[in-house]
Image (cartoon, rainbow, N blue to C red):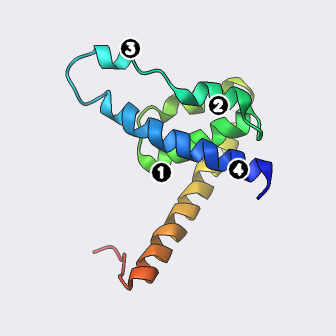
Amino acid sequence: MTPAVEAAKSAASVMAMNNVYYRFVHLPSNPEYKTNAGSAADELARQSLCGQNRFRAVGLAVSAINGCGACNAHEKTLRQVGASLGYNSNGVRFAAIVQSVAVASEAARHGTSQRAE
């Protein structure tokens, strides 16, 4: 596997972890959780072999798949470094396609259907 693919897999794993936590901080009524939400993703983005902006783009895509409301931070950061709305939108569209293929593949593997009712 290439270093860029490995870096993208690392980004996806870290963002999946962060998405759980960031969705959680919106649930409890105690606002202190929001101020205690440090992210391992920031340091990994700085060190990423695929580059900070690609790492952030993967973060945006994973956050969109996972329904994390904090993905607006990824979108804002990418826009600040020059990513266009189309770049961000197409990245998330591509992630949606990959996710749908994964769901269909998993359903086929288990012999189930994922058709909408």
Residue 74 in which image quadrant: top right
Q: CA distance from mark 1 to mark 3?
A: 24 Å
Question: Could one spot residue 39 in this view of the protein?
Answer: yes
Percent x, y of residue 79 = 66, 29
What kind of residue is marked 2?
A: Leu
Q: In the image, is residue 7 above or below residue 25? A: below
Would you say 107 lies left or right of 77 here? left
Question: Mark 2: which secondary structure?
Answer: helix
Q: Which mark is residue 65?
A: 1
Q: Which residue is mark 3?
A: 35
Q: Are marks 1 and 2 in contact (CB under 8 Å)?
A: no
What kind of residue is marked 1?
A: Ile
Q: Residues within 10 Å of mark 3 (few under 14, many from 20)?
A: few
Q: Which residue is mark 2?
A: 44
Would you say 71 lies left or right of 35 here? right
Looking at this view, is 47 or 25 the one in front? 47
Q: Disc 3 or 2, which lies upstream in sequence?
A: 3
Percent x, y of residue 28 = 22, 26
Question: Mark 1: which secondary structure?
Answer: helix
